[in-house]
């Protein structure tokens, strides 16, 4: 009779712990940069510096999701063939350059914004399937939820700090650029003409320089700390002749279509609000960039601290049950956030949505990894990522359209207006995802597939 999984990473070998911690740290740096880019910097920059409407902002953001979604599958396959580390390094390096090039695009050159966000999506598609597949490669099946929960900790810290740091950088730069001409005039009036350009510096450029730096640190951390571990199926003598097979991949996906459907529906909902959260908070609650970042920071840090114990629920209760609990909590909390307005509701509702995420996500990833052959792991995770990306891609422009064009008039809920429309759509789709989890998911794995032992 086996003992239940212990908390933390105590049940893993030293090599497995080292690799998992390294991947988690790289994931934290990467998500910090992606959160600054997608949630904080780009929506505000496009709306207030470039003069685009919300529908255009979300359409440009959709280019990121389109490329990420389409390319996760191919990059997952590539990782199965050439190894994961190269892709984990290459992905962030792409965005080191694109973040800086964004600052040279003129307002009418929307196609350049689309091209740069497409390249960012290419980098993300290379990074995430490779990182998750490597984590699954080195951890035994009964410990995978623990490992994924640590991944969650750093991922959530990145989401929490991204808007806070990016918004603070922009606000601080705004203060400096406003006061610099006064300082120059007071100390050297004849030099005012030489420094007049200081009055036209866009403070929103600051976050893009910071984003580029963080992506560079991500790539360097991956190069320095992540070892070159071959994919699991290439390390097992029993699978010495195993390799990638399109027919096996198709059979794996055909056997579990609910993985793709659930991924699509849930992220269709998430996509509705993905690029609008910050603009919504600034419009409805009059928040500054720094205030929004600070408000988001509180629940995310709390959730991150609880991620490891919550993330192991899949190992204790069963992965499918944990997914059902987590998605259900996300859906019902989103409705509560809509129906009970206010800053306190944002913090509490956002915290509960985050709790649902950290319960569901590790078990979801572990469930996917154990329901496919080791030789297909990267490809299957990439295919599920593609389904997620397709859902988000469809949701993003619809959310932008609803935010700008929808009219909502509910007499007994006077605070709800058109800006709430994408959030209501998100809440509905999360509930649909929960129903799918309750009715279609089951604990299954390929025939003859026994739990693997940790490296």
Image: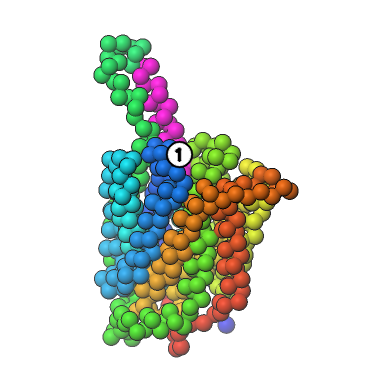
Q: Of all residues shown, which one is farthest toward the right?
A: 412
In the rendered structure, which segment of residues is drawn in magenta? 156-183
Which x, y percent locates residue 60?
38, 51
Q: Inspect this view and state whether residue 145 appears.
A: no
Which x, y percent locates residue 450?
46, 84
Give the residue pinned by disc 1. Answer: 167
Query: Who's the residue at 65% across and 60% down the image?
Result: 332
Query: Who's the residue at 38% across and 16% down the image?
Result: 182
Where the C terminus falls, by quadrant? Answer: bottom left
Query: 162 or 185, which lies in front?
Result: 185
- Magenta stretch encompasses residue 61: no
Query: Along the horizontal axis of the image, is 444 left or right of 82?
Result: right
Query: Who's the residue at 56% across and 36% down the image?
Result: 286
Query: Along the horizontal axis of the image, is 220 left or right of 9?
Result: left
Q: Majority secondary structure of the magenta segment? A: helix
Location of residue 230 by image quarter: bottom left
Query: 17 or 26, which lies in front?
Result: 26
Query: Who's the residue at 33% across and 25% down the image?
Result: 198
Which x, y percent locates residue 98?
29, 48
């Amino acid at each position: 009779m086996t003992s239940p999984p212990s908390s933390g990473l105590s049940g893993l070998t030293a090599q497995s712990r080292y690799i998992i911690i390294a991947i988690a740290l790289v994931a934290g740096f990467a998500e910090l940069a992606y959160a600054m880019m997608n949630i904080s910097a780009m929506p505000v920059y496009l709306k207030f510096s470039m003069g685009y409407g919300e529908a255009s902002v979300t359409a440009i953001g959709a280019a990121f999701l389109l490329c990420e979604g389409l390319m996760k599958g191919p990059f997952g396959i590539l990782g199965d063939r050439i190894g994961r580390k190269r892709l984990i390094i290459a992905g962030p390096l792409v965005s080191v350059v694109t973040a800086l090039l964004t600052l040279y695009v003129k307002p009418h050159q929307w196609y350049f914004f689309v091209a740069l966000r497409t390249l960012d999506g290419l980098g993300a598609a290379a990074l995430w399937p490779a990182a998750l597949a490597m984590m699954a490669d080195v951890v035994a099946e009964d410990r995978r939820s623990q490992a994924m929960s640590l991944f969650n900790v750093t991922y959530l810290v990145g989401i929490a700090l991204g808007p806070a740091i990016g918004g603070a950088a922009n606000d601080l730069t705004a203060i400096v650029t406003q006061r610099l001409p006064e300082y120059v005039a007071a100390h050297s009036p004849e030099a005012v003409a030489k420094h007049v350009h200081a009055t036209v510096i866009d403070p929103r450029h600051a976050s893009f320089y910071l984003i580029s730096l963080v992506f560079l640190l991500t790539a360097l951390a991956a190069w320095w700390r992540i070892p070159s571990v071959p994919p699991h199926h290439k390390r097992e003598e029993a699978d010495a002749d195993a390799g990638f097979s399109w027919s096996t991949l198709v059979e794996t996906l055909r056997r579990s279509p609910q993985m793709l459907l659930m991924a699509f529906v849930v992220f269709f909902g998430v996509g509705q609000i993905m690029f609008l959260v910050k603009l919504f908070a600034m419009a409805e609650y009059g928040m500054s960039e720094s205030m929004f970042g600070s408000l988001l920071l509180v629940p995310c840090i709390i959730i991150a601290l609880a991620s490891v114990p919550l993330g192991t629920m899949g190992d204790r209760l069963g992965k499918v049950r944990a997914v059902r609990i987590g998605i259900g909590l996300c859906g019902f909390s989103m409705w509560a956030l809509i129906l009970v307005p206010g800053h306190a509701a944002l913090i509490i509702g956002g915290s509960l949505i985050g709790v649902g995420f950290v319960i569901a996500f590790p078990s979801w990833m572990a469930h996917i990894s154990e329901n496919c052959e080791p030789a297909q792991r990267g490809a299957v995770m990439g295919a599920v990522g593609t389904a997620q990306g397709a859902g988000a891609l469809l949701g993003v422009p619809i959310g932008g359209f609803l935010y700008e064009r929808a009219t909502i008039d509910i007499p007994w809920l006077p605070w709800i207006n058109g800006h709430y429309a994408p959030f209501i759509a998100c809440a509905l789709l999360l509930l649909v995802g929960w129903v799918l989890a309750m009715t279609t998911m089951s604990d299954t794995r390929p025939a003859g597939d026994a739990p693997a032992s940790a490296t």
